Each structure stands twice: as C-alpha cells, then as structure tokens.
Amino acid sequence: MRKWILILILFLIVLFIAYKYVFQEHRDIQTEKSSYTTSAVELAKEFEINSIDSESKYLDKTIQISGSISEFNEHSITLDNSVFCLFSEPQVSLFKLNEKVIIKGRFIGYDDLLEQIKMDQCDIIN
C-alpha cells in the first residue's frame, strides 16, 4: 500500500512540473528591458553579412530599433524597407512615410525570401 501512495505522489509531482512548464506566464515586451538597441539599417547590414549567426543572436530577444517608416498600415509598419514590425493592437495614430520612430518588440525571425527582419508584439517608444 505504501508503494502505491509513493507512486501516486511522484506522479502528481511530475504532473505539476509538466503543467508549470507547458503553461508558463506570458512575457510583457512593453515592460521588459531591451536586450539590444540598434538602428534598422545597422541590423539589416548585420543580417546581410551573416544571417544565421545574427538570427541565433537575436531570436526571441527584446530589441529596440530606430528607423524611418517606409510602409505602414493599421497593424504593422516597415522600417527602412528591412524591418517588419507587427503590433499587438491596431494603431490609432496615423503614421507618415519617412517619419523617424523608435520601436521596441520581440525578434521572431528573418525572412530570406523578402530579406526582412520580422518582429512582433511591437510598441512605439516615441
């Protein structure tokens, strides 16, 4: 009988650890400190030189990027034709082409086909 109770307790502990691992709390990128601060042009040059090393360096990190708006819509903007920034919520303010902005967001990958750096959960700093 003691053996079955011990096995049940061990099973419950393993189940609890697995639950905590799978259902972790979400990150809040807006309050998180930026791991890197750079410009869109410098970041694009870094990816041109070596995209594999750059991607592993920035992957899932919070980055603050400055640059000029080259494209925009309600849910996203593109900085200097190289950094695509996706917002969590629609942006009410109207952007202007070639306007300088600073954006903080999470790096999610590099698109080789479009040669664009992809970020999500972005927020405008200025």
Image: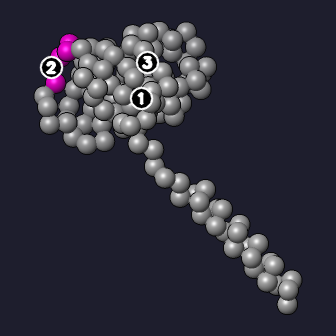
Residue at horizontal 20 percent and vertical 13 percent from the top: 98
Q: Which residue is mark 1?
A: 118
The earlier-in-sequence mark between 3 and 2 is 3
The residue at 30%/20% (across/down) is 102
Task: Tell me the distance, in whole angstroms, between the alpha carbons under discs 2 and 1.
Answer: 21 Å
- Dot 2, crowdedness within 10 Å: few (<14), some or many (≥20)? few
Q: Is residue 56 left or right of residue 3?
A: left
- In the image: residue 14, left or right of residue 102: right
In the figure, 4 relative to 74: above or below? below
Figure label count = 3
Per the rendering, the mark at residue 96 is 2
Q: CA distance from mark 3 to mark 2?
A: 23 Å
The spot of residue 44 in percent (x, y) is: 44, 13
Amino acid at dot 1? Lys
Task: Kindly identify the amino acid type of the residue bearing the numbered disc 3.
Answer: Thr
Query: Of label 2 and label 1, which has the lower sequence position?
Result: 2
Residue 44 shows up from this direction: no
Disc 2 secondary structure class: loop
The overriding secondary structure of the stretch rendered in magenta is: loop
Residue 53, picture quadrant? top right
Q: Which residues are magenta?
A: 95-99
Is 98 in the magenta? Answer: yes
| Label 1: which secondary element | strand
Q: Kindly identify the amino acid type of the residue bearing the numbered disc 2.
A: Lys
**Residue 104 at least partly seen:** yes
Percent x, y for residue 97? 17, 17
The quadrant of the picture occupied by the C terminus is: top left
Residue 119 percent across, percent down from the top left: 40, 31
The residue carrying mark 3 is: 37
